Image (cartoon, helix red, strand yellow):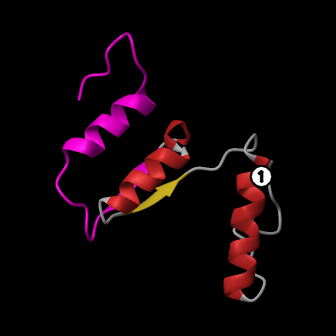
Amino acid sequence: MTVEATTNEHQAALRLLDVLPPLGGSVVTGDAIFTHADVCAKVLHKGGDYILYAKGNQSELRRDIETAFAAESGGFSPLGSGTVG
């Protein structure tokens, strides 16, 4: 899908998700530019799952992810022991 000069990749991804068939059984991956709540919600609404980056400047999101991993895995941290922020 072409990204027009008057928009950006985030908006183009939302348009692409609108025209794709149901995503059941699919995993959508993307660069950190796609780590937006509306992209995630649309992927889930279409029946898919996603793997996206949480950059260092997304401190609240990263904290939420670490908390979720720790709660579900008995203390495992997705950041490892020698993290790079």
Disc 1 residue crowd, few under 14, some 14–19, many 20+, Cα 10 Å: few
Tell me where residue 44 sits by quadrant: bottom left
Tell me where residue 4 sits by quadrant: top left
User: Is 4 left, or right, of 30 in this rendering?
Assistant: left
Q: Which residues are magenta?
A: 1-30
User: Is 49 left, or right, of 81 in this rendering?
Assistant: left
The answer to whether 75 is drawn above or below residue 9 in the figure is below
Q: Between residue 77 and residue 80, name the one nearer to us.
A: 77
Residue 84 % position (x, y): 79, 51
Secondary structure at numbered mark 1: helix
Residue at the image point whose x is 82% and y is 68% from the top? 81
User: Is 61 left, or right, of 6 in this rendering?
Assistant: right
Tell me where residue 5 sits by quadrant: top left
Q: Amino acid at mark 1?
A: Glu
Point out the residue furthest to the bottom here: 74
Residue 73 % position (x, y): 68, 86
Residue that numbered label 1 is attached to: 60
Residue at the image point whose x is 34% and y is 30% from the top? 12
Residue at the image point whose x is 40% and y is 18% from the top? 7
The answer to whether 82 is drawn above or below residue 52 in the figure is below
Q: Any magenta on residue 5?
A: yes
| Quadrant of image for the N terminus | top left
Q: Between residue 68 and residue 79, name the one nearer to us.
A: 68
The answer to whether 69 is drawn above or below residue 17 in the figure is below
Q: Any magenta on residue 62?
A: no
Residue 41 % position (x, y): 45, 55
Count of numbered tags: 1
Residue 30 % position (x, y): 44, 46
Q: Between residue 52 and residue 24, name the one nearer to us.
A: 24
Residue at the image point whose x is 77% and y is 52% from the top? 60
